[in-house]
Image (cartoon, rainbow, N blue to C red):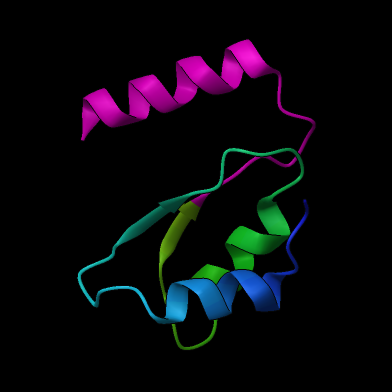
Amino acid sequence: MIMSPDTINSVFSGASERLELAFLNGCHSTDRCEGLSAGQLKIASVGWSTRANDKAAKRFVLGLIESL
């Protein structure tokens, strides 16, 4: 299911004020990331501008988690 940027913002608006990063590991998710980074929420976000390859997405998220 693809959520609109407004829906994503609504979901994250109830998150803790300590939330600093959102990782949207899905195909063509940059518009949703831009919505989180802009406006009132100002949450840093990472997403895909292209179709996400499952293996590449898994490697990326594991590397991201390890680096945090």
Judge whether residue 5 is colored magenta: no
Q: Is residue 56 left or right of residue 52?
A: left
In x, y percent, where is residue 32? Answer: 66, 62
Q: Residue at x 60, y 69 (%)?
A: 8
Q: Position of residue 6 (x, y in %)?
A: 68, 78
Answer with the quarter of the image where residue 52 lies: top right
The residue segment tinted magenta is 46-68
The furthest residue to the bottom: 40
Residue 37 drawn above or below residue 44: below
Foreground residue, 16 or 31? Answer: 16
Residue extending farthest to the top is 55
- In the figure, is residue 18 to the left or right of 65? left
Residue 48 highlighted magenta (yes or no) = yes
Horizontal relation, residue 22 to residue 68: left or right: right
| Vertical comparison of 39 with 34: above or below | below
Compared to 24, does 12 lie above or below?
A: below
Main secondary structure type of the part rendered in magenta: helix
Please state the horizontal and vertical placement of residue 56, each as a whole percent of the image: 59, 15
Q: Nearer the viewer, residue 24 or 11?
A: 11
Residue sitting at x 66%, y 39%: 26
Give the image quarter of residue 67. Answer: top left
**In the image, what residue occupies the spot 75% across and 68% down?**
4
